[in-house]
Image (cartoon, grey):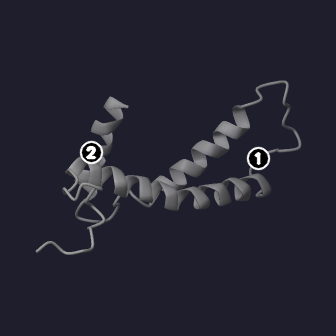
Amino acid sequence: MKDKFISTFENYTGEPESNADKISELTNQMLDDAIPHIRKSIERAIISGAIDVDGWDENHNKMLIPKAILVASLENEADQYKADGTSFERQVKKDIRNIKLFL
């Protein structure tokens, strides 16, 4: 008899979700968890003094500093997922390079 509780990885029909669905769900959960950290790092970058916020001119290269802050924040967050120093490091880097070719 089927358990009365449906697994996290089962859809409303009771059929198990595909691996693609599971991966999507886990990836989206990681993104949801990362967003508050990214927002905090953006605020830290702005108040850090690493950039000249007072010299920013909204009429000249308006997006230059915001883009730099966003890229730095995203890269900083991404570093924790790269598996550096683990036995999976080579495979993760290979997968990242491959995925970037399709984005």
Label at residue 32? none
> As rendered, which of 34 and 15 lies closer to the eye?
15
Compared to 80, does 24 lie above or below? above
Give percent across and percent down for residue 28. 42, 53
Label 2, on which residue? 95
Label 1, on which residue? 51
| Residue visible at 76% across and 58% down in the picture | 48
Residue 84, quarter of picture? bottom left
Callout count: 2
> As rendered, which of 10 and 95 lies closer to the eye?
10
| Residue visible at 26% across and 45% down in the picture | 95
Side of 47 where 64 appears, left or right: left
Q: Are marks 2 and 1 in contact (CB under 8 Å)?
A: no
Give percent across and percent down for residue 39. 65, 55
Q: Quadrant of the C terminus?
A: top left
| Residue visible at 65% across and 37% down in the picture | 67
